Amino acid sequence: MNLRILVFFVIGLFIFILDIGFNSEQDSKDIYISDQELTSLLSAWQSQVGRPPSDEEIVNIINNFVQEEILYREALLLDLDQEDRIIKRRLAQKITFLKQETIPDDPSQKELEKFFEQNKNNYYVPATYSFSHHYFSKESSAKEKAAKAFNDYQTHGAELKGDPFFLGKNFYQNSADEIKKNFGELFFLAIENLTLNEWSGPHESAFGEHIILLKEVTAGFSPPLEKVLLRVQQDYLLQAQDKAITEYINKIRSQYRVIINPDYQF
């Protein structure tokens, strides 16, 4: 009699455990993001960046959180937490590293050649410009002073003298992007159309007026694969690893349900 009771008890316990397992399976795929969690995520982002996130940035913040949570849970399913019980991000990183390790680190020459051709613009070496300039601050009638100085130089051979410039007087092999960053778009447009080894001006920048001497222009070019082989190999592997993680996330993400309070005020 006692044996029968024990058998029924064991069977009942087994059914109870199965019921819990089946009912909790969907719950384990639910990612509930509470108001407090959302507030914490948005506050942390604003503290780092110094402004509230835009709608697009809010979507990215939530997507990053969801991705981290998915990777964390998948890591738990693989018992990765047994040997290293630390924060979720660390576990997500561990499973990320595992997926990345499945990518061969020795791509073939054909794979590299194909990747190089598809991404050739990334390895383009832009044109560079070497020049000197005399600067006239916009706080002190820059245009008039620059025009007079240049006229005196052309007419009487007077020495060109301007105001001190915080970045210096001479620039060697600067790209278009560097010039635009340092001086602004108008200044680069002037540089681009100057005659070599002839003083010209005045030309406007974000800071004032300039008299410019263009000394050298080096044309941009696309280097052959062998010249950038190491960089191409590194970029190939990084892209392959990112693709592997993205495919893995996309494959399992449909199993999860993201729950956010629809009344939360962003």
Image: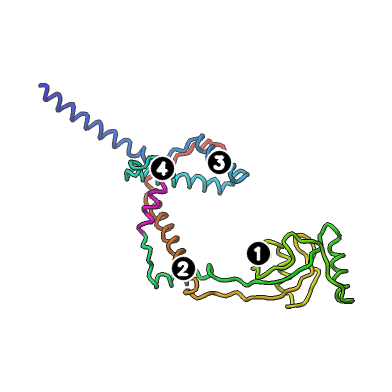
Labels 3, 4: front one: 3
Which residue type does callout 4 highlight?
Arg
Q: Secondary structure at mark 2?
A: helix
Looking at marks 4 and 2 on the same chain, the residue that comes earlier in the sequence is marked by 2
Residue where numbered disc 3 is placed: 44
Residue carrying label 1: 178
Q: The residue under label 2 is which amino acid type?
A: Leu
Kindly identify which residue carries mark 2. 230
Q: SS for tag 4?
A: strand
Which circle, 1 or 3, is nearer the viewer? 1
Q: Amino acid at mark 1?
A: Glu
Q: Nearer the viewer, residue 247 or 221?
A: 221
Point out the image quarter for the N terminus.
Answer: top left
Magenta segment main secondary structure: helix
- Contact between marks 4 and 2 (CB within 8 A): the answer is no
Q: Is residue 97 magenta?
A: yes
Residue ID for mark 4: 257
